[in-house]
Image (tube, helix red, strand yellow):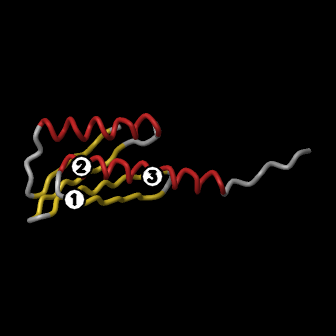
Amino acid sequence: MQIELSGHHVEITDAIREAVKSRFNKIESHYPQLDSVSLTLTVEPNVQSAEATTQYLGATLAVKAEGQEMYAVIADAAKKLDSALSHRKGAQTSHRPKAANM
């Protein structure tokens, strides 16, 4: 999975890249068909945020996490994206017609 990482008012350091990679590798192991994730990190006065966007099973999924510490925000965004992907996967499988026994 390719992670497109960008920053707004924040320099993307090696430590931030490593934190993003470690958190989002877990998502990659759960959803191997996921091709890429776009992650934007933003630092504003008193608030740090991360917004993750991806395409999965024909739908665009976007999540946003905010907080005081960047590493906690990255972890929260990964957790929210995992939850959104799980919800989308469940929605796809629950609408499949059941095969008739012949």
Task: State the residue position of label 3.
Answer: 83
Task: Say if mark 1 contacts mark 2, CB within 8 Å.
Answer: yes
> In the picture, which quadrant includes the C terminus?
top right
Horizontal and vertical percent position of residue 5: 21, 46
> In the picture, which quadrant includes the N terminus?
top left
Q: Residues within 10 Å of mark 2 (few under 14, many from 20)?
A: some
**Where, by quadrant of the figure, is residue 49 drawn?**
bottom left
Disc 1 on helix, strand or loop? strand
Work out how far the residue at label 1 is from the one at label 3, CA to CA, in angstroms: 19 Å
Horizontal and vertical percent position of residue 85: 46, 51
Task: State the residue position of label 2.
Answer: 72
Disc 3 on helix, strand or loop? helix
Figure check: 18 above or below 98: above
Q: Number of callouts in the render?
A: 3
Q: Closer to the N terminus: mark 1 or mark 2?
A: 1
Residue drawn 39% across the image and 42% down it: 35
Q: Residues within 10 Å of mark 1 (few under 14, many from 20)?
A: some
Which residue is situated farthest in the bottom direction here? 45
Q: Identify the mark at residue 100; answer none if there is no mark.
A: none
Q: Is residue 5 left or right of residue 34?
A: left
Query: Label 2 is placed on what type of residue?
Result: Ala
Residue drawn 47% across the image and 58% down it: 59
Work out how far the residue at label 1 is from the one at label 2, CA to CA, in angstroms: 7 Å
Horizontal and vertical percent position of residue 74: 25, 48
Which-is-in-front pick, marks 1 and 3? 1
Query: Label 3 is placed on what type of residue?
Result: Ser
Work out how far the residue at label 2 is from the one at label 3, CA to CA, in angstroms: 17 Å
Task: State the residue position of label 1.
Answer: 67
Query: Label 1 is placed on what type of residue?
Result: Gly
Q: Nearer the viewer, residue 8 or 23?
A: 23
